[in-house]
Amino acid sequence: MKLSVRTALWLLPILGFLGFLSAQVCGALADFHIEPPMIAHGWFDSISPDNKKAINAKFSKILKAKFPTRTPASALISELKAEGFVHPQPHMSEVCAIPSICGAADIDHELEYNWRGLACGETLRVVWNERNNKLLEIHDYYFMRCI
């Protein structure tokens, strides 16, 4: 089958859009998980997703036991990235009392793990402060979003 120049020029933007769309889908699937991270296995399913306070308390206890103060921040980063945690998209800081005054979160010091079911998506986010590659403090946040 031979294409005319006119047909080829008409198809070019459509093919370009399809290429862009497939790249976006593949990128989204690269960070797609269907269950919580390994660091949450064994305890996460025993807590109701509605009980954010209990989830944060348990996850915080695990993180602080595994990565105590003065632990190299690089150890935290490499272990969480090995489990599938990634730097989040830019967003406002969670620790802000007055959102209109606060700025964007420091995503260089945040990693999150997202997983999805049929109707809901869940996120565990880890935020840390460090000095000279030594952890000063770690915070965690759990989010659940449903359609």
Image (tube, helix red, strand yellow):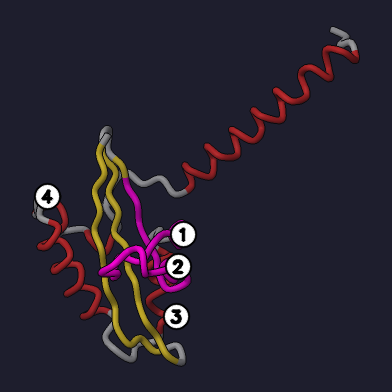
Which residue is at the front of the view, 79 or 89? 89
Q: Are marks 4 and 2 in contact (CB under 8 Å)?
A: no
Depth check, mark 3 against mark 1: the one in front is 1
Residue 38 is situated, as x and y percent measured from the top left of the image, at 28, 60
The answer to which image quadrant residue 52 occupies is: bottom left
Q: CA distance from mark 4 to mark 3?
A: 32 Å
Residue that label 4 marks: 50
Left or right for 110, reference 50: right
Residue at 26% across, 44% down: 145
Residue at 87% across, 13% down: 6
Residue at 25% across, 74% down: 63
Pointer 4 or 2: first along the chain: 4
Depth check, mark 3 against mark 2: the one in front is 2
Q: Disc 1 residue type?
A: Pro
Q: Disc 4 residue type?
A: Asp
Residue that label 2 marks: 107
Tag 2 secondary structure: helix
Q: CA distance from mark 1 to mark 2?
A: 7 Å
Tag 3 secondary structure: helix
Residue that label 3 marks: 74
Q: How many marks?
A: 4
Residue that label 1 marks: 90
The answer to which image quadrant residue 128 occupies is: bottom left
Dot 1 surroundings within 10 Å: few (below 14), some, or many (20 or more)? few
Q: CA distance from mark 1 to mark 4?
A: 25 Å
